[in-house]
Image: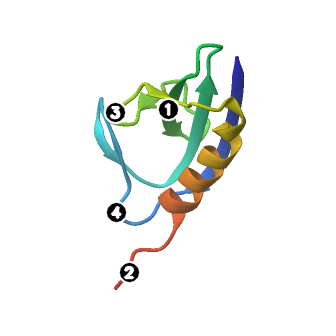
Amino acid sequence: MAELTSTFTATPDGVLTAEVGVITGDLELRSARAEDGTVHLTIRYRGAAEWYHLPGDPYHLHDPRDLETVHQVLVAVLSRPSAT
């Protein structure tokens, strides 16, 4: 299993989770890919114990080499300032 984790500060609008709704502040994103290509995207408050799933989880990658790119794009999108 391949796994990537990054920390970031969410936009003022926060990040929607399947379990608890929107969370904001300093967060960690974990992208984990199993051998069959299934990808689980989870998020938590930085340093917290409990992880929450992003809506739509699990996902599937057709090419396992895409995990890093998908992870980096998600971090960039989830932390970019909102348009005013």
Residue 37, placed above or below residue 10: above
Q: Looking at this view, is 15 or 47 the one in front? A: 15
Foreground: disc 2 or disc 3: 3
Q: Which residue corresponds to mark 2?
A: 83
Circles 2, 3 touching at the beta carbon (< 8 Å): no
Q: Which residue corresponds to mark 1?
A: 42
Q: Secondary structure at mark 4?
A: loop
Which one is earlier in the sequence, the residue at label 3 or at label 4?
A: 4
Foreground: disc 4 or disc 1: 1
Q: Residue at x 43, y 24 (%)?
A: 58
Image quadrant of residue 17? Answer: top left
Q: Is residue 73 left or right of residue 59?
A: right
Which one is earlier in the sequence, the residue at label 1 or at label 2?
A: 1
Foreground: disc 3 or disc 4: 3
Q: Residue at x 44, y 64 (%)?
A: 11
Q: Which residue corresponds to mark 3?
A: 56
Q: Amino acid at mark 3?
A: Gly
